[in-house]
Amino acid sequence: MNFPNQSAIPELIRVKPGVLDLIGIYLKRARFDRVVVLVSEGLPLSIVDRFKASLEQEEVEILQMKAVGSSEFGESLRTFRELPDAGLAVVGLGGARALDVAKYVAFLARKPFFSVPTSISCNRFCSPHSTLVIERKNRMLSSAMPLGLVIDTDVCLAAPQELWLAGVGDLMANLTALVDWKLAYYEFGILMDDYAEMQAEAAVNQFVADPHFTRSGTRLLASSLIMSGIGMMVCGSARPSSGSEHLISHALDSVSKKPMEHGLQVGVATYIVSRLQGGESELIAAVFTKSGFWSAFSQQRFRLEEWLEAVRVASSPRPEEFSVLSSRDCVPEVEAMIREDPLLQGCFFQ
């Protein structure tokens, strides 16, 4: 989908250990001393208490703190309607669902948004859209880019490793998304943005230098996902980071009895799509091996028949979604690939 072009990028970006305890300073410095906080339902109290203590120390008043357990569009609208008028900014604390709702609410209220993710499973903590559920389907809606990003790398490292691996999968999708973007350009003249393309490639190249579940690797992953989000904002489109691999993941959300974490689905689809494109499958496989991505499927695997159906569904003739899946019937190739490739065999069952 396309998003309205926006000129603003985050003015505050902090990606390092311990910054969760400094969020009060950042808000006070920016003169936001009355805020509304939307927090992930079930977030560990230790994180919430540290966040609240940081604000209390700087005399930043929390006018409302609401737990977010659903990304339903209707519930997001209710949250918007209940916003206190005196709130000067909206702060999202937690995972992708809470941040999606928080930045959509901030967008509707025309208030600054501060993003404080506690895991980095995808680039949505810094992107110009929110994924909300409308009529039981995930829909991408225009939202507020964060004015401030505060990412405590130690907090993210303490989250389940599966979420970090999902972030790796979401980041590497830049490579296949860019190829699909070029295919759409040659087929339909869908305009490309050279800066956004460069930004998306640079984001991947930065992380490839240290693709490990460590403090430095987490800082690089978070920074790379930020770059991806800004790239989408710059060109007003999801194209730099979302192509056929994301279409497959979205289709899986509909056809699968038990969908997995978004970035895990996207990552496996990225490797498959890269082979269909004749692209950088070796680089992607190497990064996934070094990062431990493949190990995420040791306990739970995908159902082969659901994936083949998702590939069928993801093939779209629409110019804005044109990809390698639209160029030919890829289902037989994908099935053969999954059955023959040792890397993929560990991700699937019949």
Image (cartoon, rainbow, N blue to C red):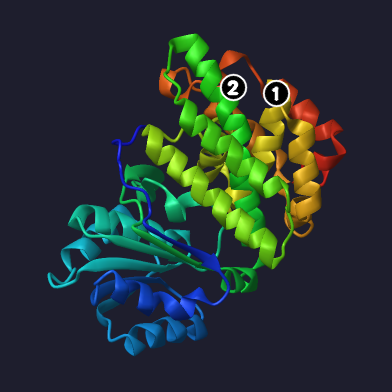
Q: Of 36 and 41, which appears nearest the observer?
A: 36
Give the answer, above or below, for where 61 lies relative to 92. below
* Element type at mark 1: helix
* Element type at mark 2: helix
Amino acid at circle 2 = Leu
Amino acid at circle 1 = Leu
- Quadrant assignment, res 191: top left
Whether residue 265 is visible: no
Is 295 placed left or right of 27 in the picture? right
Q: Of 308 and 261, which appears nearest the observer?
A: 261
Residue under label 1: 276
- Quadrant assignment, res 28: bottom left
- Residue farthest to the front, as pictured: 29
Q: Residue at x 19, y 71 (%)?
A: 87
Q: Residue at x 67, y 56 (%)?
A: 165
Give the quadrant of the C terminus.
top right
Is 250 placed left or right of 176 in the picture? left
| Residue 235 horizontal/vertical position (percent) | 39, 32
Q: Are marks 1 and 2 in contact (CB under 8 Å)?
A: yes
Q: Earlier in the sequence, mark 1 or mark 2?
A: 1
Residue under label 2: 325
Q: CA distance from mark 1 to mark 2?
A: 8 Å
